[in-house]
Every structure is written in C-alpha cells, then in structure tokens.
Image: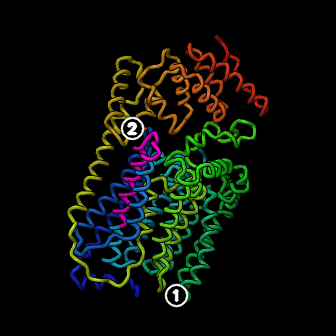
Amino acid sequence: MIRDNVAAAWHERGGVSATWVWWLGLALLCVVPFLSSWRTGPLAGLYLEGGALLFAAALTALTALTQQHAVRLPRASVYWLLLALLLVVQARAMALPYASQSDMTAAIFVGLALLSWSARAWVLRIGQQQAVVILAWALLAGAYLQSLVAVLQFIGETSWLPGLLAGPGKYYVFGQLGQRNHLGHYLMWGVLALCYLWHERKLSGWLALLLMLWLTGVMGLVGSRTIISYVIAIGLALGFWRWRGGREANRLIAIVALAIGLVLAAQFLLSPLLAWLEGVRFESGAGRMGASPLEQDARMPEWHKAWQLFLAQPGFGYGWGSYAYQGFADSSIYTQGFRTYGANVLFTHTHNLILQLLAETGLVGTLLVVVGFVWVAWGFLRRPFSAASMILTLMLLVSLCHSMLEYPLWYVYFLAVFALMLALTPAAEFTPTKPMRFRWSLVLVCLLMMADLMRVGVVYQDLLTAGRSSNDTAVAQQNIDALSQLRAREYWLRYYVDMTLVQKIDAAQAPLPEWGRQAADLAGRYRPYSNTFVRGLYLAQAGDDSGAQQWLRQMARYYPALIPYFADKTQQQPSAAALRQQLQTDCDQYTRNTGRQLTCAGAVAN
C-alpha cells in the first residue's frame, strides 16, 4: 500500500528531518538561476547553468550529511545514469568532433542522478505531500519575483536596479530569462504551484485568488504562443485525472480549471482592454498565433529536415549535438536551392524534442529517453490518488509541451527542476533498511563536482579576457597564445575556446594563421556558424580545392544573404580564385531562383 505519511515511520526509526536543507536547496535551485542575468561570452549561460548544477550538488551533499538510513538508488537516478552512459559511449563510437560536449552533458546527467537520489530521500523523510509543498512555495516565490520584473519591463522602468534586463522593445516582456517563451513556461509552473498551495490550504482562498489573478494577468502581457498549448494540454489532462482520481481529485481539478481559464482570458482580453483604457497596444500570445501561423514558421522545414536525417540513419542517429552540422549540410529540402528562412541564424536544434533525439540518437536513444521517462513517471499513477502527483505531472506536461516547439530542457536550470519534479514520485510503505554507509563517498562526489564547477567558472573568466580584441599586436598575440593554452588544458571548454579563436581569424590575412586551422575545422564540423566559412579558405590554402568548394557551396546554400560578404573576404586569398568564381555562380543562381537581388560583382575580381 502506498501512503504519504512515510515520514512518521521514518521518525519512529530514528530518522532526522532537518527540513531547512530542503527549503534552502529548493530556494536556490528553483529561484536564483531564473532571476540571474549573468550571461556573457561564447557560453552565455555558463554561470546560470553551472549555478543550477552547483545548487543540485550542494543539496545532495547536505542531504547525505543529514541522512541516517540508506536510500536505495531510485528509478530516476538509474534513468539519468543510463542516459549519461549512452552519450559517453556514442561520442567515442562515432568519433564526434567534440567528445567534450557529450561528456559535459553526461556529467550534467550524473548531477541530475544525484539530485534525484536527494529528492527520493526527502520524500521518505517528510513525505511527498510536504516535499511538494516546499517545492510549490519556491516556485511561487520565483514566479512572483519574475512577474514583478515583467511588469517593470512592460512599463519601461528597469534602469533603476542593476541586473534587471530591459526589453528589446516597447511593451516587450521576457523577464530575467531573456526569452518570452521561457518566461511563460516558468510563470505557468508558478500558477500550478499556487493551485497546489491553495488546494492544500496553505493560503487563504481570497489571498490565493488575488495572487492567481496577478500571475495570470502578467502572463497576458507575455507574447508567448506556447502558453495556449499549456492551457489545451492541461485541460485535457484534467479529464484524465478526474477519471484516475475520482471525487478526491475534484477540488484540485476545480482550482486548476479556474487557473487555466484565467490564463486563457488574460491572453484574449488583456490586450484589447489596455488598448481601450490606456491606448497601450501589444501582442499577446493569442494575438501572435493569428499573425504568424505555424505553417509559415521556420520550425516546419527544420522538422522536415530532422525527419529526413532520422530516415537516413535511423539506428543510432548522427551523434549528440550533431544536428547543427547535419542540418547545415542537408540542403535537399530547399525548394529554391537556398535557405529562404531564418536569415543568418544557425539552427542548432530542431525545436522539437522527439525529432532532435531521433536525428541525434536514433531510434535506440529516443526509445531509451521516452521509455525510461515513462518507467520513472509511472510512479505518479499509483493509487490512491495523490494531489501532489497530479500537480507534478501537470508541471512536467508544461515542460514537455514547450519542448515540442523549442528546447527549454537544453538549459540546465530548467532541466534540473524538471528532473527534480520527475523524482518526487510517492513512496511505498516505509521499510527499514541498513544505515547510511556511503555517506562520505556521496559527499565527496558532490564536493568534487562543486569544486570543478567553481574552477571552470574561474577559468571561463580567463577565456573572456583572452577573447577580447586589441589593436596592440603584442597583446593580441598574447591573447592568441592564452587561448591556445586554454584549449590544450581545459577539456570542458574546448569548443568554446575554438569558437573564440575562429572569431579572431582575419580572413583577409594571407596566408591564414596556422593557429586557427584546427579550430576552424572542428568548430565548422560541429556548429557551422557563418564565421566558419574560413574553414573553406584553410582547405583551399592546403590545396584541397574540392573540399573548399564544397564547404563554400554549403555556406552559400545555408547563408545566401552572406554570399557578398564571403566573396569580399576571399579577395585577399591567392588560393581562393576558384572559390570566388563559385560564389559568383551561387550569387547569380540565387537571384534567378528567388528573384532577390544580391550584389556580388566583386566575387570574380582578381
């Protein structure tokens, strides 16, 4: 029999609560990274994402230190460890350009396995209900603070407090997350957290209603179309939970139904209401859906491309992180021969979780992810009905809906909270186990992870310093030497060092500097941003005319608006005459195929 008062049995056998650890851990994990605006350099979210992993490791270490009884490795931990193993093996088997990127993700999954163990320990110590109440308080506090930021952005009053992000335009709201879809995701978590606290009578009805009106109203200011998908998905899920939970679920279902009704009302009514009262005009998520239908979205061709890649290599895919290059290299779906959407953006992700997994990990990896998720989440469907399980599944559903249109779970601060929710399945009847034997081993692993995270954070500052441009030739050379040294010793940052080196290559210099050759080659074969066109120049310089022409042809197909720029940058390269002729041909063909004029007259200049 499953029950939620396992904490009573725990204390009967000498267990220690120390709930301050859980409160502190969730306050850090669920609030701080989402409020930080500390984004800088080639890996802009390093401090936010590293901070989330740091807090997860700290929570696990403190949990282990206050733990008396052994807690068996939960399903969620096994799940993340299996995914970590998959990525480590795949990177070696496929000889990916940057095994460090796969290993970094695997290390994150190990951190999530530790966090999942910690969550399981707290469910045993204080019960699922109380554990989720504390999670709900943390998410509500974070959502409320985000809502204040959103309102300040909407009215244009962000300059008075350092660290507050200013919106890119009038009435443009994206919170501290820097992306309105991410803000809508996080606020929806907050609304559901409020629903649970209301259901558990942790808030008076009137106060809960006022807070709900505020949060759902602020969501009406967020021009995120994905919010509509949350409302639809949650509405359908309520029918399932009514069948699953029976009358016992009625109160929570009614509260959640009220919440999504208010969210929907704000999406449709707030914009015209403010326009009528104050003359304020902005687009809500609902308004943007009509203005930009899905079939005109750049996601559609990328989804088609990902599916074609999966069909070409269905077993194990092309490797973790490979979509950026494979999607760049595949121009077969461009009906006019050139990409006519997305401007100069490199699509590193398909904007669909399942298609991304299919393209990069194939059927084997995708089944491991999906079946493993169901295996872990099945714990929420155990009887008797648990309001905590219901609200957690709705929160997970929000993340999964968003993941069908973007990639929020590629950000560690979203993924860590998602993993935490997934791990908070109800516990069965408490069974006495052996005393905690591996406490210090677990603490040591967490401390080593925390130490390395802090070390990488310090080293990242060295990368930022060396990446600065300088007009002083000596200083510029010192920066190049510093980057080369960082590349040799800093495994986790290897790709980001290469990206920085590529940015420093002067394409007009002849011959091209040797220190940039390997960086251009590897970075181009991993994430071919437009500046990696210099890889083609290096190939031409080395006498590989066929490889150089193929690379520049792919660049022209993917970044057609930049053909004049590529042509201009080849003028000073004696070995690039064939490339200039090819670029002129691409330029003429682009004009014929699309009717859009490009000025490429200098492409064939001698």
Is residue 397 shown above or below 244? above
Looking at the rendering, which quadrant does residue 7 occupy? bottom left
Residue tagged by mark 1? 248
Residue nearest the viewer, comparing 390 with 138: 390
Residue 356, given in percent of the width and then of the height, sits at: 56, 53
What amino acid is found at the position of numbered circle 2 in the picture? Answer: Arg
Magenta segment includes 102: yes
Quick one: label 2, few (<14), some, or many (20+) residues within 10 Å? many
Magenta segment includes 261: no
SS at mark 1 in the image: helix
What amino acid is found at the position of numbered circle 1 in the picture? Answer: Glu
Is residue 489 shown above or below 116? above
Q: Quadrant of the C terminus?
A: top right
Residue tagged by mark 2? 494
Q: In which quarter of the image is the N terminus?
A: bottom left
Residue at 48 percent of width and 75 percent of height = 378
Q: Name which of mark 2 and mark 1 comes first in the sequence.
A: 1
Depth check, mark 2 against mark 1: the one in front is 2
Residue extent of the magenta highlight: 92-116
Is residue 10 shown above or below 88? below
Residue nearest the viewer, comparing 55 with 176: 55
Residue at 29 percent of width and 44 percent of height = 455
SS at mark 2 in the image: helix
